[in-house]
Image: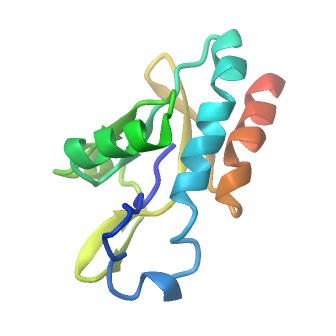
């Protein structure tokens, strides 16, 4: 699952963040995937979260939130550019629009753009069970 940004206690969100529809919700999304980790693994599915934040930022979020799902850094936007993931800007920086990719054998076989980040894991789990 690709997400825009996980906040950090004591660090302000990017300028204008509160006025961007769909910007908030990355932490509940990551926690929901972490809580569903065993269900995905029973289906043989590996989970990863990805944003443009640095590896240090990602590691801090994993540790602080006790996530079972690794959060990967694409801070140079190489993966994002290669897959042409949708972006938006806030505070003069780029952020990935919330997008979940279902990949099988190095091929994207499904794309989910969740309206409610906290329900993304549940919805994607239902999608992959149907496949």
Residue at x 81%, y 34% (from the top left corner): 126
Q: Quadrant of residue 12?
A: bottom left
- Image quadrant for the C terminus? top right
Tell me if residue 83 can be seen. yes
Q: Indicate left or right for 8 with 44 as reference.
A: left
Q: Indicate left or right for 70 with 78 as reference.
A: right
In the image, residue 106 lies at what x, y percent? 43, 22
Residue at x 66%, y 33% (from the top left corner): 35
In the displayed structure, 129 sits above or below 77; it is above
Foreground of the two, 64 or 114: 64
In the image, residue 44 lies at what x, y percent? 62, 11
Foreground of the two, 93 or 55: 55
Q: Quadrant of residue 13?
A: bottom left
Q: Indicate left or right for 103 with 126 as reference.
A: left
Residue at x 40%, y 38% (from the top left corner): 62
Tell me if residue 131 can be seen. no
In the image, residue 56 lies at what x, y percent? 21, 43
């Amino acid at each position: 699952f690709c997400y825009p940004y996980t906040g950090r206690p004591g660090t302000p969100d990017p300028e204008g963040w509160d006025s961007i529809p769909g910007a908030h919700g990355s932490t509940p999304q990551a926690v929901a995937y972490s809580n569903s980790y065993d269900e995905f693994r029973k289906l043989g599915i590996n989970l990863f979260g990805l944003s443009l934040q640095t590896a240090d930022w990602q590691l801090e979020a994993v540790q602080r939130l006790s996530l079972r799902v690794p959060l990967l850094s694409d801070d140079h936007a190489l993966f994002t550019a290669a897959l042409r993931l949708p972006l938006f800007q806030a505070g003069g920086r780029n952020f990935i629009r919330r997008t979940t990719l279902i990949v099988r054998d190095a091929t994207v076989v499904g794309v989910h753009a969740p309206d409610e980040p906290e329900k993304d894991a549940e919805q994607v789990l239902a999608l992959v069970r149907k496949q």
